[in-house]
Image (spheres, helix red, strand yellow):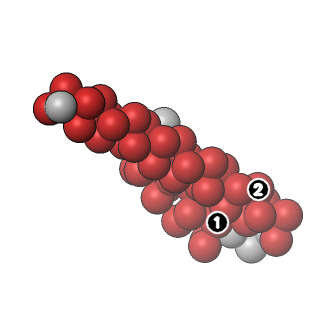
Amino acid sequence: MSLSSAKNYALRAAKSQDQKEAIELLSKAILELASSIETTDAKIKTINKDKS
């Protein structure tokens, strides 16, 4: 899961002519972004913990 996957889903949604498909693609993009944020947050917490 990555930011590039989220970007690809969002771009596909923007080009979609089908509203239902666009909504599904945007939902996937949001989930990818959330996962990426959580991963980054965990890495930052680990780095900060190691510095203490």
Q: Quadrant of the C terminus?
A: top left
Residue denoted by label 1: 13
Amino acid at circle 2: Glu
Based on the displayed image, in which of its 4 quarters is residue 29 positioned? bottom right
Based on the displayed image, in which of its 4 quarters is residue 12 positioned? bottom right
* Residue plotted at (85% across, 64% down): 20
Task: Spot the residue most to the front.
Answer: 52
Badge 1 crowding class, 10 Å Cα cut-off, few under 14, some 14 to 19, many 20 or more, is many
Image x and y of residue 39, in percent: 43, 37
Name the N-terminal-most of marks 2 and 1.
Answer: 1
Checking the image for residue 46, the label placed there is none
Q: Are marks 2 and 1 in contact (CB under 8 Å)?
A: no
Q: Secondary structure at mark 1?
A: helix
* Residue plotted at (40% across, 50% down): 4
Q: How many marks?
A: 2
Q: CA distance from mark 2 to mark 1?
A: 8 Å
**Image-based side of 31 in relation to 27, left or right:** left
Up/down of 17 relative to 36, above or below:
below
Badge 2 crowding class, 10 Å Cα cut-off, few under 14, some 14 to 19, many 20 or more, is some
Residue denoted by label 2: 24
